Image (cartoon, rainbow, N blue to C red):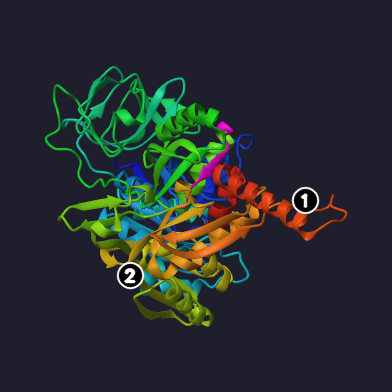
Amino acid sequence: MQHIRNFCIIAHVDHGKSTLADRLIQVCDGVTQREFRDQVLDAMDIERERGITIKSNSITLDYRAPDGQDYLLNLIDTPGHVDFSHEVRRSLMACDGALIVIDASQGVEAQTVANLYLALENDLELLPVINKIDLPAADVDRVREEIEADLGLDPFEALPVSAKNGVGIEDVLDGIVEKLPAPKGDPEAPLAALVFDAHFDPYRGVILQCRVMEGTLSPRDAIHFMHAGRDYTVEELGYNQLKHAPQPQLSAGEVGYIVAGVKSVRDIEIGDTITHPERPAATPIPGYQEARQVVFSSIYPMTSDEYQDLTKALDKLAINDAALTYEKDSSAALGFGFRCGFLGLLHLDVVQERLRREFDIGLVISAPSVKYKVALKDDKTLDVDNPSHWPDPATIESVSEPYIKASILTPDEYVGPVMELCREHRSESQTMTYLTTGRIELISEMPLGEVLFDFYGKLKTITRGYGSFDYVPLEYRETDVVKVDILVNKEPVDTLSYLVHRDKARSRAIHYCEQLAEAIPRHQFKIPIQGVIGGTIISRSTIQPYRKDVTAKLYGGDVTRKNKLLDKQKKGKAKMKQFGQVNIPQKAFVSVLRSDRD
């Protein structure tokens, strides 16, 4: 056990975690030159295209230290985006140490600090790594100062490397062996193994990723999930390498995979504790937290005959993504669909992209919303995330919405526009801290619902990409939220209803009406498109009808003949408007919601 190291790589987005993992794997001969590709641990196409890590991945490496001693290194590569911080939290529970990677040009960023606190919660030993020292803008001395000031770590322990060019990788491996602690545990104690991840294999069922804390596990052992209360038999276990490497046993301190005939991730819980039924552990392993869904949106198939395909696709996605929740939903305009819960906007974007690519399903997605707490006059309290479930305004006593504490790191030259952006999004308080020369941390308390739509994109635009954003949830606070309905030809379209603060209701209603007026084709009669709160109209656009000149065939006579034809046409238009159906094309829903989200 003294020659095992369990560690993960944590950092802000795009600081080079996956590239550093690639170099470590190459130096330890974990992959042949022929099999190597960039982001070797990222399995999904969407991860490789966007250069982001969505799912944590682990690999076991053999490393021979300069003194000739062989070590077993269990490396877990983690996501950097705030939406997937639950993946980071799960990975940290399986580790004894962590490499915290900092960009030599950008320095300590918001998510770096957030991940540091997650690591400290789990009592991990941290080894700072300064990456990208090959960049012209790299300033290693300044980054060392930030490591001491912002992270409270020893700046002289930080290892300067260039993962892209392979500089300093041997130093990192030596640092892992010397600075990070060996795991603890008793191989003879009752079995206690933490399930920190799982993925579905169509041929073998669910493959569990486990860290054995106490005891020893072997093939054909009966195992018991302490939280789920289910029993299985181990079919195979071993180390995670690029291909699974079966082993005769996994004992205390080791990380590996287990195949036990589990049919679905829904049958077990990530964070559960595995033990032997005949000699169980006294208590489950503590510390696991459920993933919290904060963004909710409805997903409908483009055509109704794709509903069954969408059902199967979501079932398969949920097998691999335990953080995705969904329940059946329906809309008068779009038919049957699902109301889904996501960890954030990037998670929503990734899920819809995977549904389109992997299952070839055309989708219509409703506007994202958060969960509101509604206190009624009869002393009941409702949690509402779907506008169609909004109660009658006459019965509402008060409404509360979730607030966040946003941390924005930006160069000082952009502070003015960033503060103005926060004020536009109903920021309640702002404090500034000068981290180093030229860098400022702006802390602001604002509603989560205000961040959902265009906040992050605008922040990146006004800071020219240098601004970084991270947040932690605060409490619910009372607010003035209203439900806005969109009427097309005086009929409400339930899919386009949304919940918004009263101050923002009119501007967004105008946007919806203008977009719909462009997307809906002209009919034979005039079509009003209105945004309403209760019975009050707050915006309107009109689609003008096609016109036919019914007087063209007249060639003379009294003016009464002309008026008679116009009156007849007027009555026909009124009758058509009364009984006519407005066909709203699918692209109208897509254009409204997509442009609002962009």
**378 or 150, nearer to the observer:** 378
Q: Is residue 543 above or below residue 87?
A: below
The label shown at residue 178 is none
Quadrant in the picture for residue 33: top right
Q: Position of residue 424 (x, y in %)?
A: 45, 74
Residue 322 drawn at (x, y percent): 37, 38
Q: Is residue 243 above or below residue 519?
A: above
Q: Which residue is mark 1?
A: 550
Pick whichever, 208 or 237, lies toward us.
208
First to last magenta residue range: 359-367
Q: Is residue 324 magenta?
A: no
- Marks counted in the figure total 2
Query: Where is residue 3, by image quadrant?
Result: top left
Single out the residue that lies furthest toward the left. 282
- Tell me how far mark 1 sits from mark 2, CA to CA: 82 Å
> In percent of the image, x 36 and y 75: which residue is there?
149
Quadrant of the rendering where the C terminus is positioned: bottom right
Q: Quadrant of the N terminus?
A: top left
304 w.r.t. 422: above or below: above
Q: Dot 2, how many residues are within 10 Å of its Cα: few (below 14), some (14-19), or many (20+)?
A: few
Residue 338 can be seen, yes or no = yes
In magenta stretch: residue 362: yes
**The disc labelled 2 sits on which kind of residue?**
Gly
Left-right relation of 441 to 488: left
**First in sequence: mark 1 vs mark 2:** 2
Residue 18 in the image: above or below residue 481: above
**137 lies left or right of 67:** right
Mark 1 neighbour density, 10 Å: few (under 14) some (14–19) many (20 or more): few
Query: Of the numbered discs in the image, which one, if any, rests on residue 152?
Result: 2
Image point (26%, 47%), residue name: 289
